[in-house]
Image (tube, coloured by chain):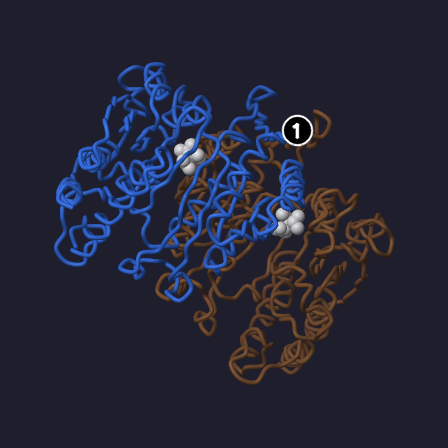
Chain colours: A blue, B brown
Amino acid sequence: MKLKLAVLPGDGIGPEIVDQAMKSVKAIAEKFNHELEYEFALTGATAIDQVGDPYPETTHDICMKADAVLFGAIGDPKFDNNPKAPVRPEQGLLAMRKKLGLYANIRPVETFESLLHKSPLRRELVEGANFVAIRELTGGIYFGDKGRTDNGNTAYDHCVYTRAEVERILKLAYEFAGKRNKKLTVVDKANVLESSRLWREVAQEMAPNYPDIKTEYMFVDNAAMQIIQWPKNFDVMVTENMFGDILTDEASVITGSLGLLPSASMGIHTSVFEPIHGSYPQAAGKNIANPIATILSAAMMFEYAFDLMEEGKLIREAVDASMAEGVVTVDIAEGKSYSTSEVGDWIADYIAKK
Amino acid sequence: MKLKLAVLPGDGIGPEIVDQAMKSVKAIAEKFNHELEYEFALTGATAIDQVGDPYPETTHDICMKADAVLFGAIGDPKFDNNPKAPVRPEQGLLAMRKKLGLYANIRPVETFESLLHKSPLRRELVEGANFVAIRELTGGIYFGDKGRTDNGNTAYDHCVYTRAEVERILKLAYEFAGKRNKKLTVVDKANVLESSRLWREVAQEMAPNYPDIKTEYMFVDNAAMQIIQWPKNFDVMVTENMFGDILTDEASVITGSLGLLPSASMGIHTSVFEPIHGSYPQAAGKNIANPIATILSAAMMFEYAFDLMEEGKLIREAVDASMAEGVVTVDIAEGKSYSTSEVGDWIADYIAKK
Ligand SMILES: CC(C)[C@H](C(=O)O)[C@@H](O)C(=O)O
Ligand SMILES: CC(C)[C@H](C(=O)O)[C@@H](O)C(=O)O
């Protein structure tokens, strides 16, 4: 099979960890006889510094031609405390989501036995937790009209959702639930927001089409509590963009394994695979960042973008082996720790030798 | 001193727990020779059932004439799954907030040594956590224009903030921080939302006026993680309405003592004191609900609305004593448990006998 990738390392630790993931991608292509073609492209603060745009046209073209995009991370603290900066790296991320039509962000939340002691939650609450959080990614308050009036003294952001947007993401969420434990939790704020009432209305209309799936409705404030109190009660959770931003990040820390969690953003034109941990600028260039989340993102890429399940599985097996052998970076090492590139090499090597 | 109260029991367990708090309020008035005057009023689903309006004019009048409002809880599940219901209990809550100008919701987050084992977090992370979460309560997406277009197929909610609204709440937050550990965390989403950029701008302008206070800025998704991972790092946290709804609920469960946490909503016309746990309909009428959060809300009322610190302190002492003696309801009892009214009587009695 021909695998056409765009590779966007981005900022901070992005380049280092994407390098490691590409080692595994190449090892897999070799082993399974896939024809691998890939092109690197600029994004984020790095792209602002080099060409003045966090998601340049050339990058977009490369992504549009690709079957899948492997993404590192973007974001640079030098932009965070300057609310008036004319361009910010995050705008690149948002432009990419919108222009590639990446409407569904998918984050599997899983615990790793060997990292449970790092979870902030008590072990018995979180052990075995396994759910998928699905966030709508191209609508809502992120992309509505925004601006100032009254000489800059009044600021507004508009949250808008259309029935078609809600149906599209709920359909995908039902498909996930159908392949898992048949429970879908629709998170909204229907007691306050009109957009949430539309979400709930559409969900209530669609639910009867999925008779084997239990649809449950939960207010976002309650969901923020349930994620901590009873994470094992969730199977698939779906919500709108802003709520999803908050809840998926909350969910990501309960496992104690933030450095290991991958994500997929499914789109109309292509799909993007990236670790959820962000650009971690403090560690950039030090060869200490954990590459596993990015390597697991590559596994998701084989599975979701190319339907190559065996390939994904072998990557996962290699990651599990590296953890079992203790070939891991300092953030999760018990004793001796390895550098970013040592871990990347070990995992690619495992794949090659298998 | 003359204490003029409005008492709004509301729905679910509201009436039972407010009854207990009123026992303590009366005992305090008696002991400290305050002239207590109070009037009961309808609100919530109860008010819809009786007069068709969740926050009737008469209730509003009673609140406007009162120096403080003691509030139970509102909400009834029969309304939750009907997105098209013409009136909902929550509308009463929102109307009350807006009409009384309750712009600041204040939630102290504290742990109780004897309940730490109920926290979903590991003891060492949460033990000693003590912070105040302040939520803007009359602005933002809750109160912006909302509706449908395109034959009901598009829904919108507008989030709006003015400089004056942001200044008012930040001023209050700085005052709290000044009396505490001198650290203020301003939570926003300034990398995406224009309204958040206004919040951050205003905070950056005000910060130099409080040179002894450290102002810290945090994105809401990060805050959702930090609350779980490092709750002890917070002193005072302030945020806008919708983020505050989510984060304050999240924060309330990390202590293991949701049934004990009170809140205050400071307003232009009066202020409202209520437990944060909600109407808990499953327990209504059973005389099993924990009245302590409401009794502690009464303590906050003496302190915040009347500046009667001794009175507040005695209520807190009585609550501590009931817990030390094990005179508590089933939700937190280790061995024998007591009914709602037994706990209420015991605490009022302790105050009277002191
Ligand atoms: C960087 C920021 C714009 C982005 C978001 O809010 O979507 C990030 O938090 C994320 O979740 O990917
Ligand atoms: C009932 C609901 C409207 C309300 C809110 O969202 O403000 C509640 O969740 C709260 O936090 O008091």
Rendered residue at 57%/73% (across/down): B331
Residue B354: x and y in percent read: 62, 81
- Name the residue at 14% across, 51% down: A337
The image shows residue B209, relative to residue B85, as above or below, that is above
* Side (left or right) of B14 relative to B207: right
- Comparing A28 with B297, the one in front is A28
Q: Is residue A318 visible?
A: yes
Q: Is mark 1 within 8 Å of ligand 1?
A: no
Q: Relative to A185, is A85 on the left or the right?
A: left
A354 up-or-down from B351: above or below: above
Which quadrant of the rendered structure holds the N terminus of chain A?
top left
How far from the left and from the top, in percent, is residue A287?
16, 39
Disc 1: which residue: B154
Q: Position of residue A38 (x, y in %)?
A: 25, 24
Q: Residue at x 40, y 64 (%)?
A: B128
Q: How many C-alpha atoms fall within 10 Å of the one at disc 1: few (<14), some, or many (≥20)? A: some
- Callout 1 amino acid: Thr
Q: Nearer the viewer, residue B72 or A167?
A: A167
Relative placement, left or right, of A166 versus B74 is: left
Instruction: Please state which of residues B309 and A11 is positioned toward the viewer in this rendering.
Output: A11
**Chain identifier of the residue bearing label 1 in the image:** B
Residue located farthest toward the bottom when viewing the structure as drawn: B336
Most extreme residue toward the right is B51
Residue A223 spot, x, y in % from top left: 54, 52
Q: Quadrant of residue B348?
A: bottom right
